[in-house]
Amino acid sequence: MSSQIDNLLTENRRFAPSADFAAAAVAGPDLYERAQEDREGFWAAQSRELLHWQEPFTQVLDWSTPPFAKWFADGELNIAYNCLDRHVEAGNGDRVALLWEGEPGDERRVTYAELTEEVKRLANVLTELGIGEGDRVALYLPMIPEAIASMLAVARIGAIHSVVFGGFSADSLRSRIDDAGAKLVITADGGWRKGKVSPLKPAVDQALSDRGDGVQSTVEHVLVVRRGENDVAWTEGRDLWWHDVVPAASPEHEARAFPAENPLFILYTSGTTGKPKGILHTSGGYLTQAAYTHRNVFDLKPETDVYWCTADIGWITGHSYVAYGPLANGATQVLYEGTPEHPEPGRWWDIIEKYGVTIFYTAPTAIRGFMKQGRVIPQARDLSSLRVLGSVGEPINPEAWVWYRDVIGAGTTPIVDTWWQTETGAIMISALPGVTETKPGSAQVALPGISIDVVDEQGSHVGAGGGGLLVITEPWPSMLRGIWGDPERYKETYWDKFGSQGWYFAGDGARLDEDGDIWLLGRVDDVMNVSGHRLSTAEIESSLVAHEATAEAAVVGASDETTGQAVVAFVILKESYLKQHGPDGLAQQLRGWVGEQIGPIARPRDVYIVGELPKTRSGKIMRRLLRDVAEGREVGDTTTLADTAVMSVISAQVR
Ligand code: WT7
């Protein structure tokens, strides 16, 4: 990490907002002043301005039983009404909500009126299937309009969705369905990826199949969208086609008001242990901050902007900045089903040109990938409609930042580097376009209404120029409300480290520069960040040891030019297995095994078969030393190892 800090310290390019942009910007410097004067009053005002409350709230924050927060607790609202009906009632029913493009090139334009009607029909279907307030519905879908409609219909009836990324395996889907006790799964036959149909329904069938332990799945029905037109197996009585039931349902549906703290969704994310955590978000505070950040951070002008966030709805970015934020704000957005390089590497730039995208939000890993392909590809397209560019998911290195601004943003667009997490629900640290002078590589400042600090292990402020741990010092509206079914783990993971101060520990290292701006330095725990996706070392290790050949495994995140970090595994094989089969082809097999067990994103870049792992006298694996090997560095201090010779053996084996 120290070489990274040195690099960042030498970065001193600055980009002031243009006078024109500043004059027309949605956000002004006054936001900071207002939030500073009265934080809770500021959030209350934002919430009243941005949302429709059927029952207005009188309380703002209830922090009487920390770390369990309640925001706007006595207010009532309907999330789907806020994202849909009210725009239609305001006369904007003909505005396009979704400019959808399938990977094969098919298109659909869905207006706010059409999306509202579809969601009302689906809400009626869900109710007929016995789904009610508080029930869990798992979604396992490609990026198609039905995915957005499903999230909103579940929200409309006060149920809870759990979106599972379509790239996750049947096993991962199963554990998420089981943990949440889902009653319904909404899926598709398949979706288009890299020029072919990638099936989804078979994974659902497998996830719900009898696992031989006599335990029945909680799932009663599977609702299936036809998209890939691939053949699928069918379970009569359980499975239903979307096109049979949704168009036949009534388009009338009244949006009932639910309390602000009604759960809205669970989203699973990796932690430091093997079992993914079900992060729980609720309604009123979440939608307030999603709408507020989407409007101010992206300078959204819903009448004229065409917004595009490339995230999949399987991640938090897809929840807050594809589904909820943009729709609450009545935005017009692009929704694209496929991969960036299909049928050729300029696909994204074609989409920007075709739809006249004005605001574009993507991840550093994608930007670095495009940088490698060269500027000729984007420069062959007209990208002049772009006026704001966003980045999310991991630290963006200054070179990629500057390339993004120069090549994609014509050297003029502001760039917002947005720091946040699944747990924070919405953006927490970012420049404001038109307000902030930007610095390549720094996420910069806490948003108005958000309180952030960088402290040392003891909790002392490091002050300008210092490095330490990122903490959030005041509760915020879209904060997670807990981990599904595990309040203890919620406290331990986020609140115990700085328990006496009552701060939220984010798990990220950070540095403050001379101006007090924040530079994120990556995770300080055993969580890896691969292409902006969070993976747990423990989860991949337990997958590896579940293979019959493996005796022991250690996984580290090694820095990688394109993906930020890459998964590198060190594996000790079982003697008995080696005697029978030998080691040939095993590294390759183990990579595939992890890919199948968890999902392709978790597949290790490298698997090294080694004879021993570096351990302390108390038996703790020293991943730091393995990371040195994986990154091709000289191995660091080995004096605390039980057997100091181990590292030279491993280095030799890896070479
Ligand atoms: C972790 C959260 C937020 C949606 C996508 C990822 C890293 C995220 C940034 C950024 C530096 C970032 C952090 C964080 N991260 N955005 N702009 N600069 N690091 O959500 O999967 O919950 O991961 O991603 O390490 O803790 P997530």
Image: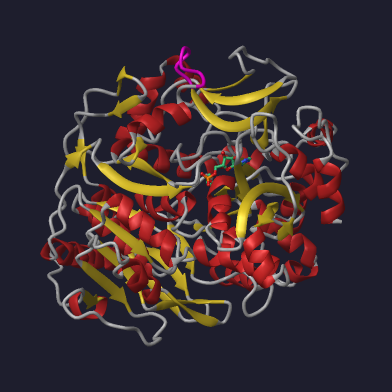
Residue 566: quarter of image = bottom right
Q: Determine the residue positioned at 65% across, 30% down.
A: 509
Image quarter of the N terminus: top right
- Residue 407, placed above or below residue 457: below
| Image quadrant assignment for residue 154 | bottom left
- Compared to residue 333, the image places residue 17 above or below, namely above
Residue at the spot 74% in from the left edge and 57% down from the top edge: 608
> x%, y% of residue 55?
16, 35
Whether 440 is drawn above or below 655: the answer is above
Mainly helix, strand or loop, the magenta region?
Answer: loop
Q: Closer to the camera, 138 or 520? A: 138
Residues rendered magenta in the picture: 497-503
Q: Quadrant of residue 483?
A: top left
Residue 329 visible in rendering: no
Residue name at image x 41 percent, y 24 percent: 475
The answer to if 304 sits in the magenta stretch is: no
For residue 309, above or below residue 110: above
Image coords of residue 153 (percent x, y): 25, 59
* Residue situated in front as seen by the camera: 391 or 394: 394
Q: Is residue 331 left or right of residue 133?
A: right
**Residue under the point 25% across and 62% down:** 217
- Residue 530 coordinates in the image, percent (x, y): 63, 52
